[in-house]
Image (tube, rainbow, N blue to C red):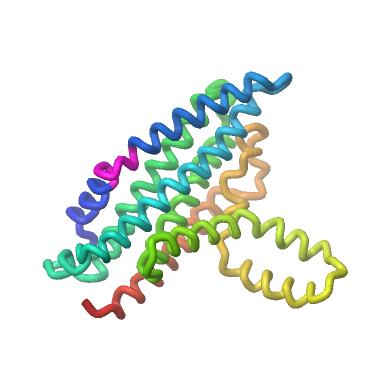
Amino acid sequence: MISWPLVKYVLTAALRDKLVLSLFILMTVGASMAIFLGSAAVVEANEFSVIFAAAGLRLAGVIGLVLFIVFYLRRAFDTKDVEFLLSRPVSKVSYLLSHSVGFMTLACLAAVFVFVTVCLIAPQAIGTGHVLWGLSLVAEYIILANAALFFAMVLPSAATGALAIFALYFLGRMIGQILGIIHAGADVAGFNILSTIMEWISLIVPRLDLLAQSSWLVYGSDQTVGYGFVLLQGGLYAFLAVMAAMVDLSRRQF
């Protein structure tokens, strides 16, 4: 079902577009900046550097991964590469699954880059919280990679697809705070209607705010999020995104 030459084709495209090199440069610059800013802290300089690097590099990895996937797929549609590949003995299902595997490989690679960089900043502080943080970062990037695959398939513009996935990402990062505001209550006109809408939206939005929490790198895991939750959420949302993209691709006529 999975065409490994197609997976290799995706990875080769990432090398050709200098994605790996760009991520390496981003990690190096981000780590250097974090260490520089941490050195100005009066107390807990290492902790400050780790938290700053984790937050910044996490976002940088997302931006690099999403932009590559969206622009790669839209370029493939615009240059008719999709039609050319599908004219070969490759089914639409095989094409989509192969690209999903390729993008998830890149997602894992990006997460490893970020994780290793954060660990190198303060290697003496590595603990079990780092392991959970790294694994949940892999799950987050896999979710976003497959969501980018879906949006790039459905939306006709690369810019629109990138904006859509960034909106999903920031909503997923903020959904916990939004639910907290709802449960706290507020005396605002129309609040009940808006709160109901957001509660329904929260049922389908991935809880990215619960993944890769920076506090784990300093204080360790608080046991509210475990490995099972991380694996379940990563696998479930990746599966749903791939299935939705598959439905869209199967209905297309080339």
Q: State the residue at coordinates (48%, 56%).
A: 234
Q: Quadrant of the C terminus?
A: bottom left
Q: Is residue 62 above or below residue 219?
A: below
User: Relative to 31, does residue 65 appear above or below in the rendering?
Assistant: below
Looking at the image, which residue is at 69% across and 22% down? 41
In the displayed orientation, state which residue is furthest to the left. Answer: 88
Left or right: residue 95 compared with residue 229: left
The tally of labels here is: 0
Residue 116 quadrant: top left
Hey, which quadrant is residue 242 in on the image? Answer: bottom left
Q: Nearer the viewer, residue 190 or 231?
A: 190
Is residue 206 positioned above or below 110 on the image? below
Q: Residue at x 58, y 39 (%)?
A: 55
Residue 71 occupies quadrant: bottom left
Q: Residue at x 66, y 22 (%)?
A: 45
Where does residue 253 sit, x and y in percent of width and height?
Answer: 24, 80
What main secondary structure does the magenta stretch of the protein show?
Answer: helix
Choose between 210 and 150: the one closer to the eye.
150
**For residue 59, side relative to residue 181 (left or right):** left
Q: Quadrant of the N terminus?
A: bottom left
Q: Is residue 136 magenta?
A: no
Q: Position of residue 90 (x, y in %)?
A: 17, 67
Tell me where residue 81 appears, x and y as whole percent.
Answer: 20, 63
Image location of residue 177, percent across then percent down? 71, 56
Q: Which residues are magenta?
A: 14-20
